[in-house]
Amino acid sequence: MHIQELILRLQRFWADRGCLVGQPYDLEKGAGTMNPLTFFGALGKKPWNVAYVEPSRRPADGRYGENPFRVYKHLQFQVILKPSPARVQDLYIESLEALGIDLSKHDLRFEEDNWESPTLGAWGVGWQVVLDGMEISQFTYFQQVGGLDCRPVSAELTYGIERICMFLGGYDNIFDLTYGEVKTDEGVFPVTYGQMRQREEFELSAYSFEHADLDLHRRLFEDFEKEGWRLLKTHGHFLSAYEQALKMSHTFNVLDARGAVSTTERPGVIKRVRDLACGCAKAYLEHEEGAPTDAAASAEVAK
Amino acid sequence: MGIAIPHDEKNPEAPCTTHSAHLYSPRKLAWWGLNYLVQQPDQTETQVGPPQKMCLDADGKPTQTGLKFAEKWGVDFAAVRFEQPAGKKEPCAVVTITKRGRPTKELLAETLPGLVASLHVPKAMRWGKSDFEFVRPIRNVLCLLGSDVVEFSVDGVRTTGTTWGHRLHHRANPAPVAVASPEAYEASMEAAGVVVHFLERRARMEVQLHALASEIGGTVVMDEELLDTLAEIVEFPTIVRGAFPKEFLELPKEVLITSLKEHQKSFCVEDAQGGLLPFFLSAANRPIEPGSEAEKLVAGGNEWVLKARLYDARFFFAEDCKTRLEARLEKLQALTFQRELGSYFQKGERMVELASELAPLFGLSPGHAREAARLAKCDLRTLMVGEFPELQGVMGGEYLRREGEPEAVWKAVKEHYRPAGAEDGLPSTAEGCLLSLVDKLDTVVGCFAVGIIPSGSKDPLALRRAGMGVVRILWERGWGGDLLGLCRQAQMVVGTKATKPDAETMQALEAFFRDRVAYQLEQAGYAGPVRRAALATGWSDLVDLKARCEALSGFAEDARFASLAQSVKRIANILKDEAPSEAFNPDLLQQDEEKALAARLAALEGTTDMRQLLGALAELAAPLEAFFTAVMVKCEDAALRSARLSLLHRLRTLFLRVADFSQWQ
């Protein structure tokens, strides 16, 4: 199956089950959870169902486009269901069937895997979903986001698009996948993932491992942080401040890929991103609902 | 969730359950018990009221007080008796009332919701809109007493007499599964594709693993922990066998085993020579017919994923091999071991120093010991250990072997994290044991020197395990000498990094290692009295301690022992408030009994072999008894008294070379 067909089917499936089809957020980020559609959407009381594709950048996973399985940037398909429906696992299984996976002939395991994002102050409880030995999804009941309790609880489903495509087609190399087909008057031209992305993988890997200016990135990290807190504290603007937190997070990932963050500094640097993200979450909830829902969590943020 | 409470009508007297079982699978938690009463027994009790004279008037008619008493307990006044209860001066109104036993079902319906809510869950979660917390969302509650549903609800989920089968492989029959009775639960679930007994799932997998391995002429590289994990992940286990390309066999065996285990939860298969075969065994969560399309697809899928994993492992291995292991030394500077104790580079330097000092003590060449210590931590900076932290040591050793280092060096590096736990063995070579000893001594002594001391459940750096490793190496290798002396040497090497006074650190180390040594004696199977008596006279030389424990254990059976232990305690009592002189003049002694004892003492003082010494001490039982019967130690004659006290003092010193018998009880 082509990558775009897989995406279209998932969008259709979840739209039919009452989800908004969202769009990727136009800033670098490491995971679909960081999209404000999830980060803020998972907070507060109002019902919220949304599904979207998120290109996710992990500089340390870059392999110059030479490794058939690992890439700097991959596509996540993210679904948020708030409150988590009682049939959520069955819905997920039906979505796999909508992709054409005949589960009567395959093996599916839900393995305990509790998720945590220290940069977002978020954690949840759930499973990794393993199909014939391959992890294809992460399934999480959010307990906290931005240091605040999630009430009600959202279910988050994350599909690894390329992995599922490779598995379905039995591909041994991610770059051999077909993204889709271009049809012109001259005929039909399939476009591979490699044609679309391999050069990008090479350049972005080289950037993360060799060319990124470390001093610039250290400076950027500091500046984004100052900017974020200025927006949040002076203006009470949590959305623009949150963008600064996302930029801090990506800047940190670039520095980390270069080994420029020592193991001892690491927790401290991550905490600086988390503090800003948690500050944004608190301001958002106050804006939406008036007062903090969880006194203990707010006290934590104030620290 | 299922709660099943059968009752046994043949045995209605049983007060509560006599048999129970816990059953669970990834989606189910179940408990059942046997021999519950359907109806709780009636209970009678006697209530004492006001005195008779207040309850009856002069005509023997009930008074207001009397009527009120009867009314209070819900009986007719006719049921009130007048008796004089113990402790009362006059007859009082008495009633006997019977409390009807309640139906067990009612009691269960009241109790169970609270019980479910109070179950301890290590990491609880909430779901949906509810504030209820549990390990995973509760979707169904099956609760039976016999064949009746016990009615209650947990977080809005009402109890039923049904439950659900396998999520995927019971979908052809989408109705819930009715469970007729608790006894039928396991069979009903099995029919619906769920094996609810953990041990049963585990046992079935074990059988299949062995069968599938022997089909290809191999044996499973068994891993009990992995088997436990898999038995907890699947509801209906079927083992599938897959193959991987032979070229991956070039990777070190440990890499393959670890990669398969950590990434794919799969087992390796080895041949009779211990070499791996290009096959693996995985557990699927469903029934699979042999030869079916599903079998082919599941095995094929696993093979595909595994190939990707092995490709990665081979990439790490090839990258690591491009530069000599030694090249990582500098990079260790940036890897913190512990804040005050510095980087792994500095730890490595301390290990080199300590290894050179200790090697000669155990008859080893300092050259190899230094080299192994210098390179021991380099693999922490390899890609492979970055990916699989549990391969630390193993990879360093492998890379050094391939670089042509001598076996004494690479094997020492490879095994220096052993013993990794109580079940694990020591490094197989003397050099490996030395390196492991040096590493662990530096860790324990260094941490104590900066105030990191395990207490209660707090032991974040696993110092107790490291300390146990130190003790086991000395004990099992038969390396004598002074354990506390080794600590002092390690302390010298830690030097100025210490933040605590040296004396304080040594005191804490002494208490710490004494506990570890005591535990080692327990593990070695010595009886309580042997351990206490042997430890009390010193434990820092483990070889000496072992010899004394052996001697004492053999001797404890000896009939003369009780008498001897008694005499030794008596000596201790006599000497308690005395300051006996070291100088002993046997010529001052007068009575035969004491002269005999002195003669034996002189003969024994030169003996060094513990067993021989203890045997000879046993022979003192009779002379000692005779001595205490005939001789008055604390006599008037000061010189004689002093000589007698000295005799006893020397005897006690002799005994203390083996054990402190006052601790023998």
Image (cartoon, coloured by chain):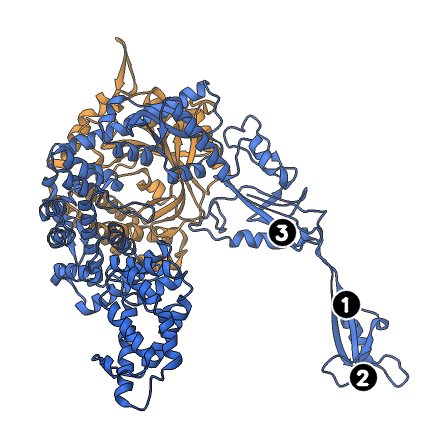
Q: Are marks 1 and 3 on the same chain?
A: yes
Residue B97: numbered disc: 1
The chain to which mark 1 is attached is B
Q: Is residue B151 visible?
A: yes
Q: Which numbered mark, 1 or 3, is in the foreground of this view?
A: 3
Q: What residue would you read off at disc 3?
A: B17
**B164 is higher (above) or lower (below) than B601:** above
- Do the numbered discs 3 and 2 sit on residues whose CB atoms are within 8 Å? no
Q: Callout 2 environment at 10 Å: few (<14), some (14 to 19), or many (20+)? A: some
Q: What residue would you read off at disc 2?
A: B54
Q: Identify the residue at image location x=28%, y=77%.
A: B649
Q: Position of residue B171 (x, y in %)?
A: 54, 28
Q: Position of residue A61 (x, y in %)?
A: 22, 35
Q: Which chain is blue?
A: B
Q: Position of residue B253 (x, y in %)?
A: 26, 32
Q: Which numbered mark, 3 or 2, is in the foreground of this view?
A: 3
Q: Is residue A28 visible?
A: no
Q: Which chain is orange?
A: A
The chain to which mark 3 is attached is B
**B392 is higher (above) or lower (below) than B299:** below
Secondary structure beneath label 2: helix
Secondary structure beneath label 1: strand
Quadrant hosting residue B574: bottom left
The chain to which mark 2 is attached is B
**B244 is higher (above) or lower (below) than B439:** above
The amino acid beneath tag 2 is Met
Between the residue at mark 1 and the residue at mark 2, the CA separation in whole angstroms equals 21 Å
Q: Identify the residue at image location x=27%, y=78%.
A: B647
Q: Identify the residue at image location x=42%, y=64%.
A: B559
- Do the numbered discs 1 and 2 sit on residues whose CB atoms are within 8 Å? no
